[in-house]
Image (cartoon, rainbow, N blue to C red):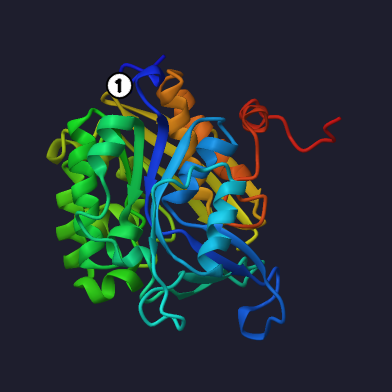
Amino acid sequence: MTDNILNIRPASETKWDCASFGEVMLRFDPGFGRVRNARQFNVWEGGGEYNVARAFRKCWGKRSTAVTALPVNDLGWLVEDLMMQGGVDTSHIIWRDFDGLGRNTRVGLNFTEKGFGVRPALGCSDRGHSAASQIRPGEVNWEKLFGEEGVRWFHTGGIFAALASNTAEAVIEAVEVARKYGTVISYDLNYRASLWKSQGGKEGAQKVNRHIAQYVDVMIGNEEDFTACLGFEVEGLDEHISSIDPANFKKMIQTAVKEFPNFKVAATTLRNAKTASVNDWSAILYAGGEFYASMMRENLEIYDRVGGGDGFASGLAFGFMEGKGPQAAVEYGAAHGALAMTTPGDTSMVRQAEVEAVMKGKGARVIR
């Protein structure tokens, strides 16, 4: 069953409900301490694109695969093992020979602090020369994935496209073939100034993302993403992107949809970070010429904010895939994103029933 806003291929015609394309890194988490003086770390796998595919399998019980690249060494095998624990198919991993030192290829590392109270979350990336950042057009058999195997929903994003000119070209190649076979394409703009700095800054980001945007069915991003990556303006937005009037964001979306009529759905999370540990959290979705807002969760307590947006993206996709309609889709996304921020690591650790309980307004209680 599908929603009439998105023409989603039937499950019977496809091998995969979701395929993602992007880098899968190792996250080193010092708990509530600091990276700069940590003596031990918890290790998780994560990636803005991969997190969506993982949630499709672990939370929503769907069939998912991830297209990425890893080195043939113990760190690459560690990422593979973590992906397997997440239930994500690994048959589309590109394996690269390792030179024994890491000059030619490596696993990207991401050291991330949760933050607490007045101390914000902090990320320190160590991902140069990673295996995934070297993916080039022609390396992935997209005809086999989208044509022979079949995919209902394809998710990728601006973080991966920003890694290098070749990854941007590979994303363009992927979305062209996905569109050819009627796969729904979602794209999370996920603007990171540090990544685009070597790719031409905002001007470079807009050139790449506006090209990709013409193939996208479901465009996801916050106010900064739409302004930096696509060049749209949001009235009343300050330089610190600290708050936004949803009415002004709606105006911007209407402008974006006029320029990109292929956007069947556009969505954003709305976060007002009062402290690192307490946020107001909600979401807005545009579909079929109408806007739909999720429940507002004021003073939401945050354990680890990383992955909240990816949780939103996967919940939104699930709502549409199950034919539940746009209002339910934005509620599934917002509730799942909220729950994803209650656990450590980048990935979701909840089940569908827990998401639906939160959607119904049930608070924390002992589950027996």
Provide residue 171's location: percent of width, then percent of height: 24, 52
Q: Is residue 2 above or below residue 187?
A: above
Using residue 63 as the reference point, say whether residue 349 is left or right of it: right
Q: In which quadrant is the N terminus drawn? A: top left
Q: Is residue 101 above or below residue 166?
A: below
Q: Position of residue 333 (x, y in %)?
A: 50, 36
Work out whether 68 lies above or below 246. Answer: below
In this view, the residue farthest toward the top is 1
The front one of 235 and 136 is: 136
Instruction: Please name the amino acid that badge 1 sits on.
Output: Ile
Image position, residue 139 (x, y; %): 25, 55
Residue 59 or 220: which is nearer the viewer? Answer: 59
Residue found 59% across the figure and 54% down from its top: 82
Q: Give 244 or 284, whichever is nearer the viewer.
A: 284
Name the side, left or right, on which 68 lies relative to 180: right
**Within 10 angstroms of label 1, few (less than 14), some, or many (20 or more) residues?**
some
Residue at horizontal 63 percent and vertical 56 percent from the top: 278
- Which residue is the site of mark 1? 5
**Image quarter in which the C terminus is found:** top right
Mark 1 secondary-structure assignment: loop
Percent of width and height locating residue 83: 55, 51
Q: Name the quadrant containing residue 7.
A: top left
Q: Could you say which quadrant of the image residue 313 lies in?
A: top left
Does any portion of residue 39 appear in the rendered image?
yes
**From where the camera sits, is residue 296 visible?**
no
Residue at 33 percent of width and 23 percent of height: 8
Q: In the picture provided, is 324 more to the left or to the right than 260?
A: right
Q: Quadrant of residue 208?
A: bottom left
